[in-house]
Every structure is written in structure tokens, then in C-alpha cells.
Amino acid sequence: MTTRPVPPVIPAASPGRRPGKHGAGHPMPLASPPGRPDVVYGFGRIDASGRVADRTTIAALGWRGGDRLTVTAEAGVMTARRDPGGMITVPARPYVVIPAPLRRRCGLRAGDHVLLAASPGQDTLAAYSFAVVDQALRDHAQVAGAGRRP
């Protein structure tokens, strides 16, 4: 018995993708798990001018060049929110500038890495110093460990 080989089935390229170019199209949509918090996280590094950039978090907020922000700070945490009367303007590129007095107030310096948390529902971006994140993790570990038996 002789059989003919079955020709391979090769799907046509999807719109927006070029054959042979990996990642050239739009990314596949991901399902959101139920109960997922309405926060988008990222990391940034403060440069000498106080700029912090992370495209993902700023894109999640929908902030554009020219938007006005009110920026506040406390120990290790900077918070920015969109405000038509704000004193800080979002530049054309996706970053936020933390003014020097606020960097000093919250203990942030050039070169420091920060955890960025964008809350689109509140239209805010928070930058947490790693010292604050570290302390929160230590506090959580102590509380979690308090209920253990030796």
C-alpha cells in the first residue's frame, strides 16, 4: 500500500505580523484573574534631574505631555496625581519629575531605584523607595511569623 504524504498545514500570517519576524505584531491579550487589584507596578530609577520613567505605569494612567500634576511626598514615598491646577507638567516623553525639595523630604537621591504603583482608578502614581518596601516586607514577615509555634 502506498500513501501520499500529507502536505503541511501552515496558517496564514495574522494581520499586523510579518512572516519570520518574531514579536512583530500585537501581543496576545491576557486574561485578568478575578480579584486582580487595579494597580500596575513597575520599577524606575531616579536620575540626577529627578526624573523617573517607566512607560508601562505611565501608559496605564493615560498621562500625556502637557498634563498637569500635583506631587506630594512623605518619608520614602512620592505621590503624583493629575490635577489641572498642578505645578508639575508631564513632558512629551513618558516620565515624571520629582522636584528636589520633595526628593529631599522623602529621602530619595539620584540613582535610587523605586517601586512605581499606578492606580488608574484614582489617576495617581506612587513611587516607593526600596527602604520603604524593605521595611514593609520586614513588618509583614514579623506579623506572619508571630502566629507560628516554635
Image (cartoon, grey):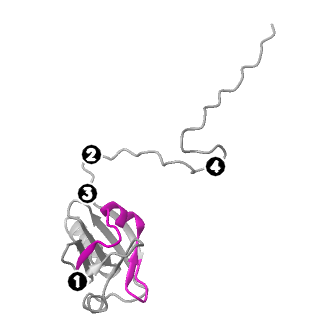
Asked which secondary structure carries label 1, the reply is strand
Q: Which residue is mark 4?
A: 21
Rendered residue at 54%/44% (across/down): 16
Rendered view: 61 above or below 111: above
Residue 131: x %, y % from top left: 32, 82
| Amino acid at pointer 4 | Lys
> What is the C-alpha distance between the residues marked 4 and 2?
34 Å
Graded by Cα atoms within 10 Å as few (under 14), some (14 to 19) or many (20 or more), the crowding at tag 4 reads: few
Check whether the beta carbons of the residues at disc 2 and disc 1 lie within 8 A of each other: no
Give the percent coordinates (x, y) of residue 8: 69, 26
Q: Quadrant of residue 115?
A: bottom left
Instruction: Identify the amino acid type marked 1.
Output: Ala
| Residue ID at (32%, 62%) | 62
Looking at the rendered structure, the kind of residue marked 3 is Asp
Spot occupied by residue 17 in the image (x, y as percentages of width and height) = 57, 44
**Which quarter of the figure is the C terminus placed in?**
bottom left
